[in-house]
Image (spheres, grey):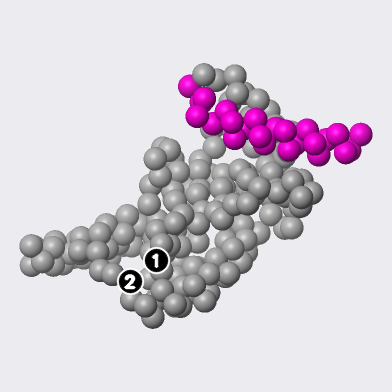
Amino acid sequence: MPSVMKALRKDLKTLNPFTYKAIPEIPNFIKTLSPKQPVSTKKAERYYKNKRNVNKVIRQHAKTHNVTVYGNRAINSHLPRYLDKHTDDWDFFSSTPRRHAHQVERRLDKRFGGDYFRVEPAQHPGTFKVRNNITNEGVADYTKPNQRIPSTRKEGMKVAKLSWIKKQKKETLLNPSSQFRHAKDEETLTRIRVYEKQQV
């Protein structure tokens, strides 16, 4: 079996170099051909020591590219800190989600000094997820929006407006097929109402 995988990797790499580099899934596919090896302690240690840099890299990319923050990160940016909801990953709208996801993956790998991250198509069509290769946790999702997203600038990044987020949550609550999200969205709306009451 290893010899077959080795031959297949060789065949893939004989593709026109432009084609090989232009299709991001090919290198990631090749990575999956080899049996998964345990992460070395040295590599894991380097990841955990530099983990704080993940958000720095993602944030810096968001400041210089046409992406819009949404999800919990966006909600937290609008609300006072005591109404924050902890989240470890980022959600972005992007007109070119695959390209932006791979840009961030390359920047993270460069910062960490090795192959520490990868990009995968997410379950939701049009979404690409950046994962770390140590714990397999996602660090950022890039999704192509199906509508114009009203946004404002916060800390140098485009962030979905709170009024739009509130409208989306209310629409989800009216959708029976999204019942699995109802509890979370109701809790989000409660936090927003608490904030809005303070603004009166």
Pointer 1: residues within 10 angstroms few (<14), some, or many (20+)? Answer: some
**Label 1 close to label 2 by CB (< 8 Å):** yes
Q: Nearer the viewer, residue 54 or 63?
A: 54
Residue 10 is left or right of residue 70, and the answer is left
Q: Is residue 43 above or below residue 13?
A: below
Find numbered disc 2 in the image and state the secondary structure of the residue it sits on: loop
Residue position for label 2: 39
Instruction: Name the disc covering residue 28, or none.
Output: none
Which of the numbered marks, if any, corresponds to residue 134?
1
Q: Quadrant of residue 24?
A: bottom left
Query: Where's the N terminus, which quadrant?
Result: bottom left
Determine the secondary structure under disc 1.
loop
Q: Is residue 56 above or below residue 158?
A: below
Find residue 121 and report its horizontal and vertical position in percent.
38, 47
- Mark 1 and mark 2: span between their CA atoms? 7 Å
Badge 2 amino acid? Val
Mark 2 neighbour class, 10 Å CA radius: few under 14, some 14 to 19, many 20 or more: few
Taking the spot 72% from the left edge, 33% from the top edge, the residue there is 190
Q: Residue at x 68, y 28 (%)?
A: 167
Residue 184 position (above or below residue 173): below
Can you tell which quarter of the image residue 198 is in?
A: top right
**Three-letter amino acid code at disc 1?**
Ile
Taking the magenta stretch, the answer to whether it contains residue 197 is yes
Percent from the top left, x then y, of residue 156?
72, 58
- 80 or 31, which is in the foreground? 80
- Residue 155's x, y, as percent? 74, 58
Magenta residues?
177-200
Q: Position of residue 77 (x, y in %)?
A: 72, 50
Q: Is residue 160 above or below residue 102?
A: above
